[in-house]
Image: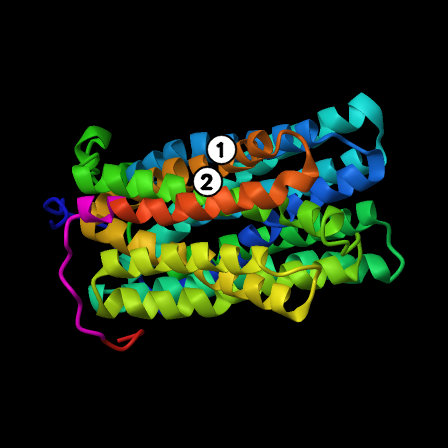
Amino acid sequence: MSAPPEPAGAPVALRPRRLLAVTSFAHFMNDGIIFFIPVVSDLLIEAHHDSTATVTAMLTVFYLCSAGVGVLVGLLADRVGRRGPLIALGIATLGVSLFGFDAALTASGATSTALAIAAAVVAGVGSSVYHPLGGSIVQLSFSDGARGKALGVNGAFGSLGRALYPALFFVIAGLGLSKGDTALVAGTVALLAAAVIAAGLVSGGADGPRRGRAHATPSVPLRSLLTRSVVALMAISLVRSLAFIGVVSWIPVYLTSSRHAGISTMLGVIVTIMYAGGIIGQLLFGLLADRFDKRAVLALDSLGSAGGIVWFLTTSGHTVAATASLFVFGLFTFSGFPLLLSLVSDYVPRSSSATGNALVWGVGATGGQALGPLVVSVLMGAQVHRLGGAFGAMAVLIALSVLATPLLARTARSNPVQLFG
């Protein structure tokens, strides 16, 4: 099934290589900050002995805000453009949220809880921007045969951010700064990065040669985008993400409480290795998306992630085997960006790419992220020692999501071409 006919005037990138470089940097910053938030949860439990209910509320609010605002951001970008400034605003908003988390770590009692949830709201709004808009810029900048590879490169930088941020936090804190001061440093860096990203995307032609409301690109009505394949892809994305983030969000707590890793550099290293698997996975699955049936590649990705969880549960402590299993889990788990967005490109017109991305990534993936921590919390019944069983249930859920793959329409394979050809 191909995308609907293309309206005239879809934006075309002026400088693809520059846009890929700047959006990759933005992806690095965005995902680095987002995936630092589960570490904040662990820090709150350590500092204030917060209950799992508080942590669950914070994570759920964060992901719900991200999912809810994402579709609005996608619709706005498809109608009026301004993808570059919007992405920069999103990164800046994430930076501001870190100031709020700093305040939550230094406060106590109900004030700390209120500040943490307020910061989660701000972070959720900021995080809603990058994936639909950054993905849209890459989709509009590269041809079919190179799009998966370009998305894979872009996604690899997001995985690099996820891998480095938790470890860097503990390294900087180890130099003498308090954990709160380290969050302030990260927030300041995010604000500076936002200015660089805004300048780079505007000069690179993120919205093509025509910008602004007066030259808005005609977009397809939202209802017309909800084809069987798009709805099925949203559902698959939601289920996968629910299970993925259900595990990822609680991994720091599980390693600390059940595997006795402690709140230390060791925890940061283990989490970093898990996220590092996505650096290779994004590139690998981006290439596979350009060469093979994307539906089969998506199924392989899901089964590999489920297998990684099962392997981890058969290990003990924080041994080499346990760390290796988390690397494999990360390799498959954090590779959905090029796969899902490559499929979006096949199912929606270019002029509605940001909205299509927001439906699949925002409502689907981010909606699943909102439910994941809550579902795992319910399964473990507020008893941290039951996390292992909850993780096993998530592995089964990921494997079951493969059964919906036949609902996706087959897409034509692309002939591989040079990335910047």
Q: Which residue is mark 1?
A: 371
Which amino acid type is shown beneath numbered disc 1? Answer: Leu
Q: Which mark is residue 242?
A: 2
Q: Is residue 25 visible?
A: no
Q: Residue furthest right?
A: 176
Question: Could you say which quadrant of the image residue 355 lies in?
Answer: top left
Q: x, y percentage for residue 334?
A: 47, 57
Which amino acid type is shown beneath numbered disc 2? Answer: Leu
Which numbered disc flags the more N-terminal residue, 1 or 2?
2
Q: Is residue 286 magenta?
A: no
Main SS of residues in magenta: loop
Q: x, y percentage for residue 179?
A: 81, 49
Left or right: where 418 falls relative to 163: left
Q: Tell me what residue is drawn at x 72 percent, y 54 percent.
A: 259
Q: x, y percentage for residue 341?
A: 32, 52
Q: Tell me what residue is drawn at x 77 percent, y 38 percent.
A: 45
Local secondary structure at mark 1: helix
Q: Which residues are magenta?
A: 404-416
Left or right: where 116 falls relative to 216: right
Count of marks overlaid on the render: 2
Q: Quadrant of the C terminus?
A: bottom left
Rendered position, 10 above or below 224: below
Left or right: where 121 falls relative to 240: right
Nearer to the camera, 394 or 373: 394
Rendered position, 50 above or below 290: above
Left or right: where 409 falls relative to 251: left
Nearer to the camera, 58 or 134: 58
Q: Is residue 412 magenta?
A: yes
Q: x, y percentage for residue 152?
A: 39, 65
Local secondary structure at mark 2: helix
Contact flag, marks 1 and 2 (Cβ < 8 Å): yes
Q: Tell me what residue is drawn at x 36 percent, y 44 percent.
A: 237
